[in-house]
Image (cartoon, grey):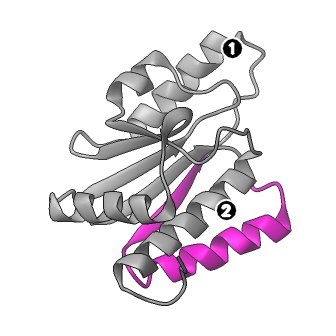
Amino acid sequence: MKAKLIYIGKEDSAELTAAVAAYVGKIKFYLPFEMEAIPYLKNKVSQEEQKRLEGQLFLKKIDPTDHVVLLDEHGVEMTSVQFSQFMQQQMLRGTKRLVFLIGGAYGFSEEVYKRGNSKLSLSRMTFPHVLTRLIFAEQLYRAMTILKGEPYHHE
């Protein structure tokens, strides 16, 4: 299985971007993983129009066979062990590519919500995009170490 994170944003913190890159390198030891940025739209449009335009950009990056998980504040909250079980289920189901999305400042368009297979909440709190990427990358790495029975995660 391959995994991908697609997000709206830019690299806005050298320190956090370096930390994200470090986790991405660790994740690649366990499964093919890549991240792709969709640049912020610089148009002065309404919130709904911005979501619609961002949604079109997301949908162009998603293949019909992808399993799409929206990282969304209204999604299911999981423990790290539950997230590792989710990852294992996807592998056992034969998912070829698991795609995670981080939306823009106003969330996802209706079209993206319709395309998503599930929603996952990293927290009920709101984080800056670069911090969300870091938290997600660390949790994906943690999930993979849990599945391999490695000593990174302690319960």
Q: Nearer the viewer, residue 23 or 144?
A: 144
Q: Look at the numbered disc 1 and give the secondary structure of its residue.
A: helix
Q: Look at the numbered disc 2 and give the secondary structure of its residue.
A: helix
Along the horizontal axis of the image, is 13 left or right of 11? right
Residue 20 appears in the rendering: yes
Q: At x 76% / y 28%, what residue is drawn?
A: 42
Residue 30 picture quarter: bottom left
Q: Position of residue 124 (x, y in %)?
A: 65, 38
Badge 1 amino acid: Gln
As measured in the structure, the alpha-carbon distance from the residue carrying label 2 to the one carrying label 1 is 26 Å
Q: Position of residue 61 (x, y in %)?
A: 41, 42
Q: Is residue 16 magenta?
A: yes
State the mark number for residue 134.
Answer: 2
Q: Quadrant of the N terminus?
A: bottom left
Q: At x 48% / y 51%, what residue is drawn?
A: 78
Contact, CB < 8 Å: mark 2 with mark 1? no
Q: Nearer the viewer, residue 69 or 46?
A: 69
Q: Is residue 83 above or below residue 45?
A: below
Q: At x 74% / y 20%, what residue is drawn?
A: 43
| Of pointers 2 and 1, the one earlier in the residue sequence | 1
In the rendered image, the residue lying farthest to the left is: 93
Badge 2 amino acid: Leu
Q: Position of residue 92 (x, y in %)?
A: 17, 64
State the mark number for residue 47.
Answer: 1
In the rendered image, the residue lying farthest to the bottom is: 151
Q: What segment is highlighted magenta in the picture?
A: 11-37
Residue 10 appears in the rendering: no
Q: Position of residue 91 (x, y in %)?
A: 23, 64
Q: Nearer the viewer, residue 107 or 144?
A: 144
